[in-house]
Image (spheres, rainbow, N blue to C red):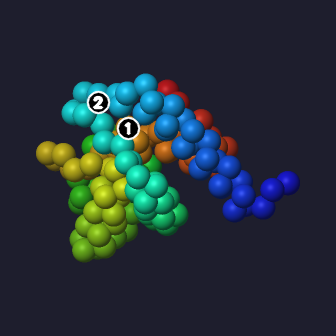
Amino acid sequence: MLPRSRVNLILWLEFMISYEDQRAGGAPHAARGETKWWETAEDHRFALEVLQLPLRRQILRFVAGEMKSREQIEREIGLGAARAEFHLAMLEKALVVERAIGGYRATPTGILYLEKVEAKSCGKDLKR
């Protein structure tokens, strides 16, 4: 059995292969606008660092189902306004969450992360 850190690395690599396969076919256009993708290795590394924090993954999972207001996120996750704003800004910069009129929602990149990495590491299948 592989150590947990190696399992996470393998899951991350599987995610990146899937991500690159989708990107090679042309970035899909989301109903809400053009999907943003990571452009450089630094962008990939930054997103990985942002998503290492369990709290941020919890926020991403919470906004994956439907748009949530910052106040809903604060209540659900148990954060103050300043901390919620900080973590949401980090998730936005990592391109896994986007701000929209009325709140925040997961981006297609964020959904892909949840399906390919988070679900496998938790033993769940998030596909609908």
Q: Label 2, secondary structure: give it.
A: strand
Query: What percent of the width, then of the height, locates residue 31?
Result: 25, 27
Instruction: Give the residue drawn at x 34%, y 50%.
Output: 95
Disc 1 crowd, CA 10 A, few/some/many (<14, 14-19, 20+)? many
Disc 2 crowd, CA 10 A, few/some/many (<14, 14-19, 20+)? few
> Measured along the vertical axis of the image, is residue 73 above or below residue 18?
below
Q: Label 1, secondary structure: give it.
A: helix
Task: Return the residue at label 2.
Answer: 30
Q: Is residue 90 visible?
A: yes
Q: Is residue 75 left or right of residue 121?
A: left
**Dot 2 and dot 1 residues touching (CB under 8 Å):** yes
Q: What distance separates the C-alpha of mark 2 from that of mark 1? A: 7 Å
> Measured along the vertical axis of the image, is residue 102 above or below residue 19?
below
Instruction: Give the residue drawn at x 37%, y 48%.
Output: 39
Q: Is residue 88 visible?
A: no
> Measured along the vertical axis of the image, is residue 7 above or below residue 64?
below
Task: Return the residue at label 1.
Answer: 108
Instruction: Give the residue drawn at x 52%, y 63%.
Output: 52
Query: What percent of the width, then of the height, locates residue 20?
Result: 49, 37
Where residue 7 sits, quadrant-wise, is: bottom right
Q: Is residue 72 left or right of residue 118?
A: left
Query: What percent of the width, then of the height, locates residue 40?
Result: 41, 52
> Measured along the vertical axis of the image, is residue 112 above or below residue 57?
above
Where residue 74 sits, quadrant-wise, is: bottom left
> Which residue is nearer to you in this view: 45 or 80?
45
Amino acid type for the residue under numbered disc 2: Ala
Amino acid type for the residue under numbered disc 1: Pro
Instruction: Give the residue drawn at x 45%, y 30%.
Output: 24
> Which residue is nearer to you in this view: 83 or 50?
50
